[in-house]
Image (spheres, rainbow, N blue to C red):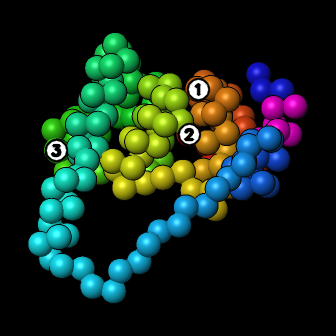
Amino acid sequence: MITKDFLLECGEYIKSGGILSGAVFTPVDIPTHEFVDPSEAEAYLKKNRDVFFVQQLLGLIDKSGKKDSDVYKKAGIDRRLFSKIRSNLEYTPAKKTVIALCLALELPRNEADLLLSSAGYSLSRADDFDLAIAFCIEKRVYDFLQINEVLDHFGFEVF
């Protein structure tokens, strides 16, 4: 059962744009360039290309020691969809599916961000649903009943 204090703290987290009380957000300066050499861009891609989402997911499942079926069942994902994800290296599921997998794996924030990023997503500080999910992850709340209680409290679609 989620407490009233937890919901109030989550509400403050959402209002503050994802900053836990006492934490400080520092924006990052990104340099700009007027011209990009195609060979330089190709070298950058080779050097910085991360693994595909499927590879990242399967690695995290292996690391967790859980069975695939335990993960996709906890995430509320159909066996056929998980099979589709597993068998197609370039398949990218919906963002909500990736979030459900992060929660089912009980990933800490840095690993959840990594898995989301490998699928081309992030938990945006400009989206209240994402902030509610980020809050639950940072507070290590991974029980879907409790998460749904938080989401419902703020008027978001539940899992």
Magenta stretch secondary structure, dominant: helix
Query: Does 17 sit above or below residue 37?
Result: above
Task: Name the mark nearer the viewer: 3 or 2.
Answer: 3
Whether residue 2 sits left or right of residue 4 in the image: it is left
Residue 63 in percent (x, y) is at 33, 19
Image quadrant where residue 82 sits: top left
Chain-order first, disc 1 or disc 3? 3
Task: Name the residue beneath numbered marker 2.
Answer: 159
Mark 3 neighbour class, 10 Å CA radius: few under 14, some 14 to 19, many 20 or more: few
Find residue 142 and name its label: 1
Q: Is residue 9 magenta?
A: yes
- For the question of whether residue 112 can be seen, the reply is yes
Q: In percent of the image, x 28 and y 20: which residue is there?
A: 62
Amino acid type of the residue tagged 1 in the rendering:
Tyr
Q: Secondary structure at mark 3?
A: loop
Q: In percent of the image, x 23 and y 44: which residue is there?
A: 51
Chain-order first, disc 3 or disc 2? 3
Task: Name the residue beneath numbered marker 3.
Answer: 88
Amino acid type of the residue tagged 3 in the rendering:
Asn
Chain-order first, disc 2 or disc 1? 1
Query: Does 115 sit above or below residue 33?
Result: above
Task: Give the Cα separation between the discs numbered 1 and 3.
Answer: 27 Å
Magenta residues span 5-10
Residue 98 in percent (x, y) is at 42, 43
